Image (cartoon, grey):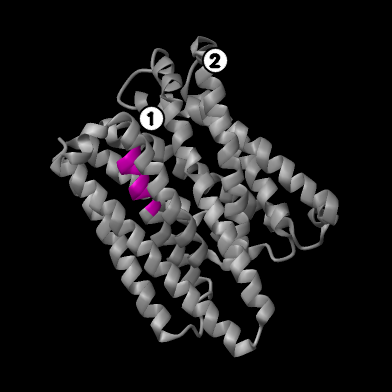
Amino acid sequence: MLPAFIGIISALVSGVLNGSFAAPMKRTVKWEWENIWLIWAVWALIIVPLVIAFSTVPELFGVYRQTPSGVLVRTFLFGLGWGLGAITFGKGLHMVGLSLGFSIIIGITAVTGALIPMLIFSPATILTPGGLVIIVGMLVTIAGVAFCGAAGMIKEAGRAAEQGDNASRSNFKLGFLVCLVSGIFNAMLNLAFVFGAPIAEVAKEYVAGPTAAFRAGNAIWVLALAGAFVTNLGYCGWLMLRRGTWKNYTSSQTGTYWFWAFLMGTLWFGGVALYGAGASTLGKLGTTVAWIILMATSVLVGNVWGILSGEWKDAPKKAYRRMAQGLTLLIGSIILVSLGRYMLN
């Protein structure tokens, strides 16, 4: 019972960090998207994972040498695919805003990232009472995300109509498409963790104690996120060379921007590490249960940040009602998934 409780709490805190990491982007107005995203990628995908892994997993490279090469390649490739999700995630938030962007992307990611591991590794649990409750929780998550997305659309439609801005409508549609693509690729982060599990099993030979599962999982993230970094580096570098935005790094009054980028990276990887800890302590369905809790909490927190940052200023009352309904459903989904996991004990 205690490990399950700790796992759920870890997933909840993970969602808070994941839903908060992009908020500092609002403070980097003199940089373009690719400027802030590249610094985030260096910090979140390379530096922090390496520091934490070397601190928690003795003989890290020895772990990789003992792991079958096929596992290493799959983990890296899933990370590479997730890198595309990270790029489109950042672009999607930039184009449609924190609230709607989080809702669309994470709604799709939640279902694909949770259902695939459940079908592959624990298909028998789907028809048990606990499994059915988790499925219902998953459906409630989709409904909650749909309501949040509808609220964002109402808000944007009202703003575009008020301003008579057809270009804004067109950009919003493109941003919506980018968010859909991002949702599909973002699920690969969970698949990297699922299919990289043999790496953690080898790492457990080098670690001990009650935090062994959490520490061993860090060996997976180093490899998966290295793959993601390749994608992010290529795209951001190409953008900066094509647009000449690399010069923004020397712009005046942007010294604090580096701090905001580092904060984004620290918050994000902190969320990833805690997700891994939660999934590792929740048993066979850990990657499904923790993933749904992570995604639902991320949407909830992302929408709160969207409201606090002024994205919803002067929005129609109907949009606020839809948002409240969506957030209520998301809270309900977290409760249902947690209950389903308890019933499986």
Closer to the eye: label 1 or 2: 2
Q: CA distance from mark 1 to mark 2?
A: 23 Å
Q: Residues within 10 Å of mark 1 (few under 14, many from 20)?
A: many
Q: Secondary structure at mark 1?
A: helix
In the image, 86: left or right of 279?
Answer: right
Image quadrant of residue 124?
A: top left
Q: Quadrant of the N terminus?
A: top left
Q: Residue at x 59, y 89 (%)?
A: 162
Q: Is residue 334 above or below residue 286?
A: below
Residue 126 versus residue 194: which sits nearer the camera? 126
Residue 76 versus residue 57: which sits nearer the camera? 76
Going by the numbered disc 1, the residue's amino acid type is: Phe
Give me the disc on residue 69. Answer: 2
Q: Secondary structure at mark 2?
A: helix
Residue 262: % across, % down? 62, 48
Residue 30: % across, % down? 74, 64
Q: Which residues are magenta?
A: 287-295
Residue 289 colored in magenta in the image: yes
Q: Quadrant of the C terminus?
A: top left
Q: Residue at x 63, y 51 (%)?
A: 261
In the image, 341: left or right of 212?
Answer: left
Image quadrant of residue 69?
A: top right
